[in-house]
Image (cartoon, rainbow, N blue to C red):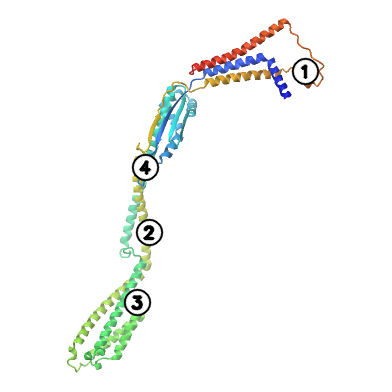
Amino acid sequence: MAEITALILTFLKAIGKYRWHAVVITWVVALAGWAVVFKLPNQYEASARVYVDTQSILKPLLAGMTSLPNLDQQVLFMRRTLISRPNVERVMRMVDMDVKARTPKEQEDLIEDVMSRIKIAGTERENIYTISFTAPTAKEGKDVVQAFLTIFVEGSFGGKKQDSEKAVQFIDDQIKSYEERLATAENRLKEFKIRNVGMLPSQGADFGSRMIAATDALNSARLELAEAEQARNAIRRKISGEGAPGDRIDPSMADPALEERIATTVKTLDALRTQYTEQHPDIVAQRRLLEQLQARKLEDSKNRKPSMDPGASYSPMLQQLTVALSEAEARVASLQARVAEYSTRAARLRTQSTEVTEIEAQLAQLNRDYQVNHENYQKLLQRRESAKLSGDLSSATDMLTFRVIDPPTAPALPSGPHRLQLFSLVFIGALLAGLAGAFLLSQVRPTFLSQATLREVTEVPVLGSISMNWTAEQTVRRKRRLVALAGAVLLLFGTYGAGVAAMLVRPTM
């Protein structure tokens, strides 16, 4: 603690030695600083507050019909891009600030200065934004804030409307392109159908389904034919003598072995038809054998002797069996024609299997291309209407409402500079500068102010010291100097107080 006290005393003595230098430096710094403070131009801060209403009844009403714009994001984007170079240049032209710049360098400096003085603040949750600008005159500040407010409001509508128009134009170009694609696909599909008429699948059935259907129909017809032949053969057997006793024909008139061979051949042929086509060699051989046996039977019936019973030909049962046999023969002939037709169709499908499969694959590809183009075309038509509605919706004032809470006004009093604070800072700085100057001079021209300092520096013991004896004349001059010093210091404080009082009385100074 003693060392600190000694150091402080040494410091004060050093300053006291150069006290007049300290006073002069303080006065010079204070006067120069106060002159600068009083010459600083006034600054007028104009501001405006605007509320952005993004809630609209149109949102729930048009939900699902169009793409609703994100109004909150749109306003936030405008807020962040408001202080941009193009907007600042536009504002400068609107308020005639650009005439102040005569060279490109001055133009750049003016733009940077305006961008540094404009401020926009607000919260996205409350949607209340404040635009402020500091200008040398109140009118200029008001005009600049009004210009920025106009750009803020207009930009929120114009940008979205322009984007919607570009989107509609792009969709129109895509629709024209897809119309040409659809026309080309339709012509290609039409020409393909004309070239391959008769070989295209009907009602959505492909070649495999048609082949299965033809095979099933052929098998069903063969089964019906086998049933009809069995029924016909049964009638024949009944007529030949296997019927009722009263309706029997003379057994000598029929050949049982021949009938048995015919029945066996028919069964064998029916079994083969369930496995092979009519062109199979076994079926052809059995059919030829059956024709030979039936021809032989017909020849035997021609050479058959008439029955001795004159009433046999007039039996009612025989007549009914004869009619039933005729009907059975007709049904068998009909079913044979059906089987032959189905066999021809199945054979033709087998022959065309490779070609038809390729045609179906090409048709599926053409239909798929046409369907894709058609679906995209329909979607583009819907998107175009949605884009048009979105553009009209974005330009509607009901979707985005701007309410100016505080309009921009020309402030009556300047907002800066804060001369009182600057005046006080200059005064404090002048005092510190005076003290620092005196201390530096004491270090430049050092002297020993005490015995302890002399002993520490020279490391020589000090035997004693001689006190200064002032004469009466020197004492008077010393007192006058002290009075003059005190007056200079008091005058400095008085000047500071007068300046503070003047600024409090006239804040526009």
Q: Which residue is mark 1?
A: 451
Mark-to-mark CA distance, 3 and 4: 72 Å
**Residue labelled with disc 2:** 365
Q: Is residue 211 left or right of residue 448?
A: left
Residue at numbered disc 4 = 59
The residue nearer to you, when weighing 300 against 191, is 300
Mark nearest the camera among 3 and 4 is 4
Dot 4 or dot 2, earlier in sequence: 4
Q: Which numbered disc, 1 or 2, marks the residue that appears first in the sequence?
A: 2
In the rendered structure, which amino acid carries the disc numbered 3? Thr
Residue 172 in sight here: no
Distance CA(mark 2)–CA(mark 3): 34 Å
Residue nearest the observer in this picture, 8 or 231: 8
Amino acid type of disc 1? Answer: Gln
Which mark lies nearer to you, 1 or 4? 1
* Extreme-front residue of the structure: 1
155 vs 470, nearest the viewer: 470
Which comes before the other along the chain, label 2 or label 3? 3
Q: Which mark is residue 277?
A: 3
Label 4 CA crowd tier, 10 Å (few <14, some 14–19, many 20+): some
Tell me if label 3 and label 4 are in contact, CB under 8 Å.
no
Camera sees residue 358: yes
Residue type for callout 4:
Lys
Quick check: 186 above or below 438? Answer: below
Q: CA distance from mark 1 to mark 3?
A: 143 Å
Q: Position of residue 395 (x, y in %)?
A: 35, 38
Residue 504, given in percent of the width and then of the height, sits at: 51, 17
Q: Are marks 1 and 4 in contact (CB under 8 Å)?
A: no
